[in-house]
């Protein structure tokens, strides 16, 4: 519904095969996750995320070709569900279904294998006398209040959370990235005189209205400085008597996609007017980050670290929720996770070289700010804080971060959000530290600090109006009794089976002794 009628990404003729492919993919991944849950219990979320997302995304051949990645990813591309689903979708959407069969068979085989293995595990456990006992309730309520008496409301809430989260994610991501094209991209035009540059701008605006916002400059050095300070995505210097060729300035490190657009568009413009065009790169990306994604992924690490500590801690250790306990813990945790993420980005993967103290300090602030944002929603709606927090910091934050795609190639809303949200502030801080000698860092630090302080103040207000819950909300006694009764019944059954087995073995020994005496 989102990809088809709402956003128009999926053609009407492909809706049925796309729906069938997606349904099969959801079923295959769900079946595999059930198997992992049988093996790892509640911790199955970790191997599940690792297999389906951490390995599945790069191996999918969608965001980047697997043949540009280490050899492990072409191997994983052959059997993981995300690559199979992605390739099947590509075949259905763009190749009339040609080549989809083998990928659909991978999904079917994976689902069948997962179901059979899950059934086998259940059979073996039952055979050993390990009767399944009811799961103990350790999450009293999704919304932070008393559990609804009506079970229907519980199931509605449980279903609404993943449904809403996936719908919001897809809407935000597709809405931002489905039609990447220049939108008011800031570029300087430099002529021998401002009149010459203005004439060129007027001419280009007639043919490319709304694609570029031109800044008229008569000094190439000034335009170069504006590109280096990330105020502009590029500059186009017109030929003059002193320099008969046109020149394009870009700063690749400030946004690879925008830099490519500027080079491509203005090279074509120059060539169409018989100009010789020279391109000068003012801030090239290093070999270890030639796509410019290191800042985005490190920023995502900071954001997810701040979000997860509140999500997990509020449930697993509710006694830490009062601010006098929470603030010191968050300070220590933020410092620890900032170091861990630096070690991953630096020594472990060689994606980042140096800049430890600056990245550590900014990372600590970013983690703390997102943790306080999550705390505000957690105080109000409990675990349902997952939805508004993820919407703000990830589903809107990633497109607005200027990381994966330039904000000047997305709808105007994301350009506005770029100056407001914590994720863009984190990404731009990293980019400023790594590639621009920390120029412009102060503004992004102010953004993160405002989020931290405002959310801390809101939490203080909420705590005055609403008692901080430091224990799980009580579960109705009759429900506990029913669960305990079933657990005791299961244990009694298991004990009876064990006793019967012992009696059978004892009788077998007695019979053997009688046979020995008779002989």
Image: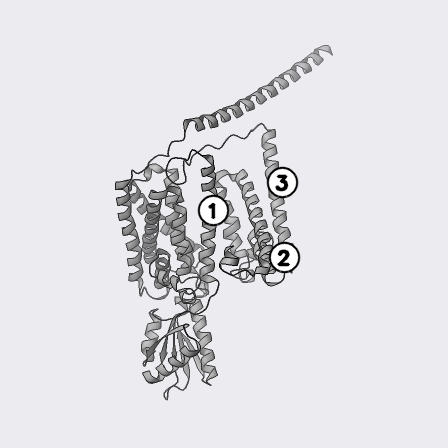
> Is 430 located above or below residue 474 in the figure?
below
Give x and y (percent) for residue 185. 39, 70
Image quadrant where one finds the C terminus: top right
Q: Is residue 158 above or below residue 128?
A: below
Which residue has dot 3 on it?
A: 116
The one nearer the camera, 511 or 125, is 125
N-terminal of the pair, mark 3 or mark 2, is 2
The x and y percentages for residue 321 are 32, 40
Q: Nearer the viewer, mark 3 or mark 2?
A: 2
Q: Which residue in the protein does label 2 denote?
A: 100
- Residues at marks 1 and 3 touching, judged by CB atoms closer than 8 Å: no
Count of numbered circles on the image: 3
Q: Quadrant of residue 71?
A: bottom right
Q: Please identify the residue farthest to the top as the structure is shown.
A: 518
Helix, strand or loop for disc 3:
helix
Marks 2 and 1, the one that precedes in the sequence: 2
Mark 1 — residue? 162
């Amino acid at each position: 519904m989102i990809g088809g009628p709402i956003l128009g990404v999926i053609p009407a003729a492909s809706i049925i095969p796309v729906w069938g492919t997606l349904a099969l993919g959801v079923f295959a991944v769900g079946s595999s996750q059930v198997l992992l849950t049988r093996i790892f219990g509640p911790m199955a979320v970790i191997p599940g995320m690792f297999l389906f997302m951490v390995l599945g995304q790069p191996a999918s051949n969608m965001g980047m070709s697997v043949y540009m990645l280490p050899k492990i990813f072409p191997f994983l591309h052959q059997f993981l569900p995300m690559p199979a689903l992605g390739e099947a979708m590509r075949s259905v959407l763009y190749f009339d279904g040609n080549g989809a069969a083998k990928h659909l068979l991978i999904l079917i085989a994976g689902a069948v294998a997962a179901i059979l293995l899950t059934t086998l595990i259940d059979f073996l456990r039952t055979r050993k006398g390990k009767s399944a006992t009811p799961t103990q309730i350790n999450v009293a309520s999704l919304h932070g209040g008393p559990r609804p008496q009506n079970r229907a409301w519980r199931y509605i809430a449980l279903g609404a959370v993943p449904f809403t989260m996936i719908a919001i994610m897809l809407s935000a991501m597709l809405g931002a990235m489905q039609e990447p094209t220049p939108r008011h991209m800031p570029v300087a035009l430099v002529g021998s005189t401002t009149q010459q540059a203005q004439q060129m701008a007027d001419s280009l605006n007639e043919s490319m209205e709304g694609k570029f916002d031109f800044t008229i400059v008569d000094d190439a050095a000034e335009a170069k400085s504006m590109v280096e300070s990330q105020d502009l995505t590029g500059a186009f210097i017109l030929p003059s008597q002193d320099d008969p060729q046109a020149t394009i300035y870009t700063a690749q490190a400030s946004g690879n996609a925008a830099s490519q657009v500027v080079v491509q568009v203005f090279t074509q413009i120059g060539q169409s007017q018989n100009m010789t065009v020279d391109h000068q790169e003012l801030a090239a990306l290093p070999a270890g980050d030639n796509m410019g994604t290191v800042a985005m992924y490190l920023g995502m690490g900071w954001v997810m670290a701040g979000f997860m500590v509140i999500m997990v801690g509020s449930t697993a250790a509710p006694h830490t929720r009062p601010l006098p306990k929470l603030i010191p813990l968050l300070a220590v945790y933020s410092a620890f996770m900032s170091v861990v993420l630096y070690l991953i980005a630096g020594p472990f993967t060689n994606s980042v070289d140096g800049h430890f103290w600056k990245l550590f300090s900014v990372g600590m602030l970013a983690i703390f700010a997102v943790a306080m944002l999550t705390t505000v929603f957690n105080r109000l709606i409990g675990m349902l804080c997952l939805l508004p927090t993820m919407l703000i910091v990830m589903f809107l934050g990633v497109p607005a971060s200027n990381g994966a795609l330039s904000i000047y190639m997305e709808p105007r809303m994301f350009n506005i959000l770029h100056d407001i949200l914590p994720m863009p502030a984190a990404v731009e801080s990293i980019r400023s530290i790594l590639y621009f000698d920390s120029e412009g860092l102060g503004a992004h630090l102010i953004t993160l600090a405002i989020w931290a302080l405002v959310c801390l103040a809101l939490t203080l207000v909420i705590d005055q109006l609403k008692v901080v819950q430091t224990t799980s909300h009580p579960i109705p006694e009759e429900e506990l009794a029913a669960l305990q009764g079933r657990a005791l019944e299961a244990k009694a059954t298991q004990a009876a089976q064990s006793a019967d087995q012992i009696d059978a073995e004892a009788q077998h020994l007695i019979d053997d002794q009688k046979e020995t005496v008779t002989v």
